[in-house]
Image (spheres, rainbow, N blue to C red):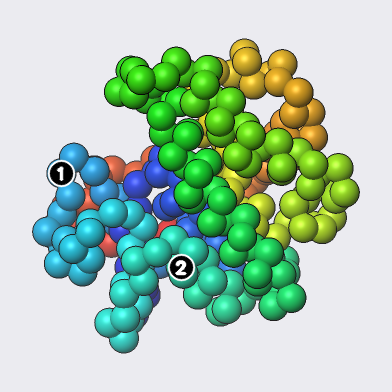
Amino acid sequence: MLPTLYSFRRCPYAMRARLALRVSGTSVVLREVVLRDKPAALIALSPKATVPVLQLPGGRVLEQSLDIMRWALSQHDPEGWMQVTEHDEVQAIVALNDGPFKQALDRYKYAPRHPQRPPEQWRDEAVEAMLAPLEARLARHRWLLRDTPSLADMAVLPFVRQFAGVDADWFAQAPLPRLRAWLHDWAASPLLDSVMHKYPAWRVGDEDTRF
């Protein structure tokens, strides 16, 4: 019996969970969710009803994307993404990403909903909160913590990708050359392509989709 993953293709939290599942070689039953019409099965498992949610064969439910990443990599971590000595540093980067950066990113991306400030101010807040510090990190290594990818990289890259897509022309000229190269290398990778396949929305009674 396989674990069951409730996911949404474009959600960056779900993307990072799928990245870890894919690189670990962990197969799951994928249930693609339409966020405006969440299935009752998802709500029953996780009342917060946000993706991703992973139900393990024994019944345990993982409701946080980082927990899903860590669980998958604990099964198999062939590329060495998860290192015990990096735990605290990973936690700090993810907290920055999921907190101040994500808040500014959402307000930048959906600026008409947040008219109290112009979009450029939300953009600059996001850069100051996280992207400028990441640019500085990338001056030391090819990836955030070392010269090979880590859990920190894969946990935040989907969000940086989303930021870059809000105003691609601005991002292409921004004083963040190392960040752009880092994002480009990942975006061009077969790994990302492998987790972005489009699946139809899952409905009760559908045949299982294996991911």
Percent x, y of residue 94: 56, 56
- Residue, x 24% and y 43% (percent of image)? 35
For the residue labelled by badge 1, is the local secondary structure a helix, a strand or a loop? helix
Frontmost residue, 176 versus 185: 176
For the residue labelled by badge 2, is the local secondary structure a helix, a strand or a loop? helix
Considering the image in quadrants, where does the N terminus appear?
A: bottom left
- Examine the rendering and report whether any part of residue 196 can be seen: no
- Examine the rendering and report whether any part of residue 186 can be seen: yes
- Residue, x 74% and y 75% (percent of image)? 85
Which residue lies most toward the front here?
Answer: 116
- Residue, x 18% and y 40% (percent of image)? 36
- Residue, x 65% and y 71% (percent of image)? 87
Reading the image, the residue beneath label 2 is 68
Quadrant hosting residue 81 = bottom right
Few, some or many residues within 10 Å of mark 2 (<14, 14–19, 20+): many
Q: Earlier in the sequence, mark 2 or mark 1?
A: 1
State whether residue 161 is above or below residue 108: below
Left or right of residue 146, residue 18 in this image: left
Percent x, y of residue 10: 41, 40
State whether residue 124 is above or below residue 95: above
Report the amino acid beneath label 1: Asp
Percent x, y of residue 121: 52, 21
State whether residue 25 is above or below residue 158: below
Reading the image, the residue beneath label 1 is 37
Which residue lies most toward the right here?
Answer: 140
Frontmost residue, 207 versus 186: 186
Left or right of residue 53, residue 41 in this image: left
Quadrant hosting residue 39 = bottom left
Report the amino acid beneath label 2: Ile
Left or right of residue 149, residue 11 in this image: left
Q: Residue 13, which numbered label?
A: none
Distance, label 2 to label 1, CA atoms, is: 23 Å
